[in-house]
Amino acid sequence: MVPYILVNDMEKVWSLLVNAKKNRTERSNVRVDIILDNAGFELVSDLVLADFLLSSKLADEVCFHGKSIPWYVSDTTKHDFNWTIKQLGSANHMWMSRCGINWEGNLKKGVWVFHDHMFWTLPHDFSSMIEVASDLYAELQKSNLLLFKGDLNYRKLTGDRKWEYSVPFHQALSKFHPAPLCSLRTLKSDTQVGLKPGQGEQIQASEPEWMVSGKYGVVQFDAGL
């Protein structure tokens, strides 16, 4: 399975969270933000990840960012988010219902928060956020780690350009650095950066459809400024 993860920065992400936990003070909670992609099962797995971050004490609070309207039919909106947790809470399955009830409690306690913002559905690369939606950029700056889910978020992180495969991720972000960030992405479009020299070309030679097949993925981290 690992060979299909073309960039695997999980160790860097783990180190960041462990160090943030060590350096936490009473006045500075560790916050992780998850910029959501699809509703349905993918959202449930995002909620499980957020549960792990809290239960392992790697984070004190998790902020979810969804769409005000569905950019694509499956995009997570506030209604999807709340409905999913309510459905789990009323499920006829002990562990599913326990999760739903606990997650509802996280929202009531304020350790989970859902935000939506029109910027996520505007036709701008994320490098424009500081000018177009300075309030959202300032909100993201409060985070210890930003997790960007999915292919569309990756395309907007990198400007959806036909970069050379070996261009550094940091460069392709075009000065979008509100906080340390990581893209969790399955390749479904023809933009990819941060590969080793020759890595993309080698795959291309044997698998011409590798960038859109959904077979490959990245866990790609940028520490910011």
Image (spheres, rainbow, N blue to C red):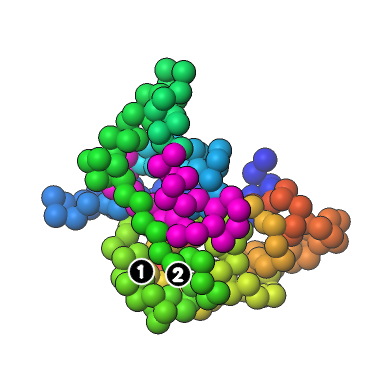
On the rendered image, what quadrant is the N terminus found in? top right
Q: Position of residue 103 (x, y in %)?
A: 34, 35
The image position of residue 49, as x and y in percent, is 44, 40
Q: Position of residue 132 (x, y in %)?
A: 42, 79
Tell me if residue 30 is in the magenta stretch.
no
Measure the alpha-carbon separation of dots 2 and 1.
8 Å
Say which amino acid is labelled 1: Leu
Horizontal side of residue 6 vs 221, given as left or right: right
Asked which secondary structure carries label 2, the reply is: helix
The residue that mark 2 highlights is: 119
- Residues in magenta, as a range: 54-83
Q: Where, by quadrant of the figure, is residue 165 drawn? A: bottom right
Identify whether 87 is placed above or below 194. above
Relative placement, left or right, of 175 versus 216 is left
Q: Is residue 194 above or below residue 62?
A: below
Rendered residue at 47%/79% (across/down): 128
Residue, disc 1: 136
Q: Earlier in the sequence, mark 2 or mark 1?
A: 2
In percent of width and height, residue 185 lies at: 59, 54
Query: Is residue 63 placed above or below 71 in the rendered structure?
Result: above
Q: Is residue 121 above or below residue 163?
A: above
Quarter containing the C terminus: bottom left
Front label number (2 vs 1): 2
Say the numbered circle drawn on residue 106.
none
Identity of the amino acid at label 2? Phe
Q: Are marks 2 and 1 in contact (CB under 8 Å)?
A: yes
What is the residue that sits farthest to the bottom in this orientation? 131
Q: Residue sitting at 42 percent across and 50 percent down?
A: 78
Left-right relation of 214 to 50: right
